[in-house]
Image (cartoon, helix red, strand yellow):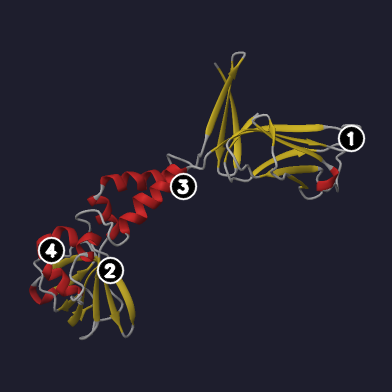
Amino acid sequence: MTINASIGELVQVQFPCFDIDGITPLTGKGDSDFGKLLIVDNVISGVTMTVAEVGSTGRYVMRFTPDVGGLWYAEVTTEVEDIFADQVEVGPPPDDWIDAIVSGVWEALLPGSFPAGSAGDILGNVPSTLTTIETKIDIIDTNVDTIFDALILAVYTASDGAFTYVETDAVKADGFYDDLTVVVRNASGNIARRIFAYEQTDGTFFFDGDVPFVPAVGDQVIVLGMLGKMVCEGNQDLLAKLVEIWQRLGLDADNPLCISKLSQEANGWKIVSQEVGDKLILTREDV
């Protein structure tokens, strides 16, 4: 059987250890009780391999971390001269998804690297002398559809309210904030609700569900947006990378965590080796 691994990834291979009768488990053995050999591409490796028992079961685990790519051969000899060995096909680290995170996500959110038209691009390029969110929004009013989804869209002051709505000093047109989230900070606590409807008259926000207190004059009213949605809509390449990362991390039910796969055919059979999480699954199929 050949195992797949990456450079720098800990390889662990479990094996049983028996006494001379081949039946009685040999327990209590330490690392020094075993002979060990590591070969990579027909050359003896200087990498250290250790052996440790799993509890007191007579089952042991050989462990090593490959430092180069290639075909590795790991062999352990017991005190009764039983030999256990396995092969490990070692390749480079999975830089494709690492690059997807570093280049496709973080760099898209860092200053100076915002996707054109994204919320970060618009907010990041507003003159630094402008300090209030409301002023920034007014300056880029021609980009309303884009800035609409910024992380914190606006902060207003409540002028009146009831359990079902809050009136503020907002002056945007009807429907401007519909379906976003509003947070009301009151002496009784902070509460967040989806905006069922927004009306320009009295800057009124209607909640999707009552709040447990009557908003008071002077309360802070914060409108939140969806920065992640904005970044994805402004950059299809980034969206594709985010979907791939989601799948590779096993967060997509249709794409469980599967880092590598290897198949071999011989004598009418096909053996498929697949890593799922920290387990190795072997499947035998007719060819």
SS at badge 3: loop
Mark 4 and mark 2: Cα distance apart in space: 16 Å
The residue tagged 4 is: 175
Disc nearer the start of the sequence (4/3): 4
- Image point (27%, 54%), residue name: 231
Which is more toward the observer, 210 or 203? 203
For the view shown, which residue lies furthest in the top direction? 267
- Image point (43%, 45%), residue name: 97
Mark 3 and mark 2: Cα distance apart in space: 31 Å
Indicate the position of residue 237 as horizontal and vertical percent values. 29, 44
Mark 4 and mark 3: Cα distance apart in space: 38 Å
Tell me the number on the disc at residue 191.
none
Indicate the position of residue 253 as horizontal and vertical percent values. 44, 43
Number of the front mark, 1 or 4: 1
Mark 3 and mark 1: Cα distance apart in space: 43 Å
Mark 1 and mark 4: Cα distance apart in space: 81 Å
SS at badge 4: loop
Is 180 on the left-hand or right-hand side of 10? left
Disc nearer the start of the sequence (1/4): 1
Identify residue type, mark 3.
Leu
SS at badge 2: strand
Is 251 on the left-hand or right-hand side of 149? right
Seen in the picture, residue 1 relative to 165 is either above or below; the reply is above
Tell me the number on the disc at residue 249.
3
Cβ atoms under marks 3 and 2 closer than 8 Å: no
The residue tagged 1 is: 80
Tell me if I can see residue 148 in this picture.
no
Q: Quadrant of residue 264?
A: top right
Identify residue type, mark 4.
Gly
The residue tagged 2 is: 193
For the view shown, which residue lies furthest in the right direction? 20
